[in-house]
Image: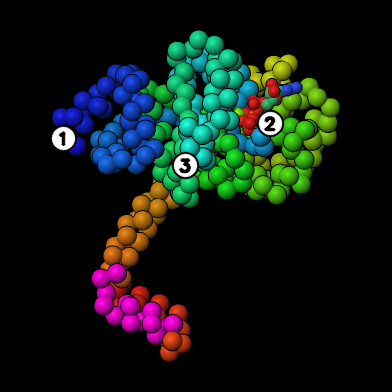
Amino acid sequence: MKLYLLSSIVDKIVRGDRRILSKTISMIDNQEEGYKNIIKQIFKKTGKAFTIGFTGPGGAGKSSLIGKLVPEFQSLGYKVAILAVDPTSPISGGAILGDRVRMQNQIVDNSQVFMRSIASRGASGGISRSLRNIVRILDVAGYNLILVESVGAGQLEVEVSKIVNLTLVLFTPQTGDKVQAVKAGLTEIGDIYVINKCDIEGANSLFNTIRDLIGSTDRKPIVIKTSVKKNEGIKELSKTIHHIQTNRQNILKEKEIAMIDNEIKEILFDEIQKKFTAKLEKNKEYRILLEQIYNKNKDPFYVADKLSKLLIK
Ligand SMILES: Nc1nc2c(ncn2[C@@H]2O[C@H](COP(=O)(O)OP(=O)(O)OP(=O)(O)O)[C@@H](O)[C@H]2O)c(=O)[nH]1
Ligand SMILES: [Mg+2]
């Protein structure tokens, strides 16, 4: 991409051009040629946005809670963007479109909120790369609070939790019993556990169970009750998050360093893998060695060891 074109894209994003912002997000999500240059260009201007992941079983109330939290965050002065992470394609993701409508109903007519679903392209790791760079673009566009709803179970949520500053895990008396939480690996990833739908029966006992099971671990995550329906606990939750955000330098520095560590390893390993594969394929001896394993003359460990000594210097 030509340099003047790049600066003009960046300028437009900074000035709040939503069309260009959207196009750039697609470009990143599709990992189109040139997206890295955009990130390089803006990188030094990033760092203001705070990201929160909302995870938890389907129907726990993630979208509804986001809908209620948005005005609270706005009154605290945040400019909010919402990303819905869809593990399938955005087109076939009927659930997401449903979600967007539902969220839109809650945040009626709010032109200040940017909303968007992103796809993971199936490949593991794809979502992290997209998400962290999309966050950077939103950051320079002035969105300083980015709420990420992940739809799906297990692996995806764990992946998302590694790239957001704060992870909220939602449970409800209907969906979030103890066994389910443990099974889905959700006990490890939450910074805040939200027992939502506390207007329905069983919420108190679920709250106690989660507090005893997860809240008392060394990580000491916060456990909090909310009801979207009755508008309870929402303000407290937004204030808790605001407090963590304003003290993030003290509370979250190590997590952010770990995030950078992850990213660098990911970029490096990707690069190394590409280079290594290219070298292997060029190596004439490689095919012979494969045949030798096939004929049981050599074992795979011997060959791998030989190749790594030959190719990694
Ligand atoms: N009684 C009650 N119902 C709620 C509450 N919060 C959400 N709901 C309802 O629960 C249903 C699911 O809510 P959503 O916000 O779509 O849940 P979600 O976690 O986003 O669901 P997925 O995106 O499908 O995973 C909706 O019918 C909501 O109206 C609550 O606090 N109390
Ligand atoms: Mg939802």
Segment colored magenta? 281-294
Rendered-image quadrant of the N terminus: top left
The residue closer to the viewer here, 152 or 46, is 152
The residue closer to the viewer here, 280 or 236, is 280
At which x and y percent is residue 70? 55, 19
Residue ID at (68%, 31%): 59
Left or right position of 40 against 88: left
The crowding category of the residue bearing disc 1, from other C-alpha atoms within 10 Å (few below 14, some 14 to 19, many at least 20), is: few
Residue ID at (33%, 21%): 19
User: Looking at the image, is mark 1 or mark 3 nearer the viewer?
Assistant: 3
Left or right position of 223 against 258: right
- The quadrant holding residue 25 is top left
**Vertical position of residue 97 compared to residue 154: above or below:** above
- The quadrant holding residue 49 is top left
Q: Amino acid at mark 1?
A: Lys
Mark positioned earlier in the residue sequence (1 or 3): 1
Numbered mark located on residue 60 in the image: 2
Rendered-image quadrant of the C terminus: bottom left
The residue carrying mark 3 is 120
Q: Amino acid at mark 3?
A: Ser
The crowding category of the residue bearing disc 2, from other C-alpha atoms within 10 Å (few below 14, some 14 to 19, many at least 20), is: many
The residue carrying mark 1 is 2
User: Looking at the image, is mark 3 or mark 2 nearer the viewer?
Assistant: 3
Q: Amino acid at mark 2?
A: Ala
Secondary structure of the residue carrying tag 1 is loop
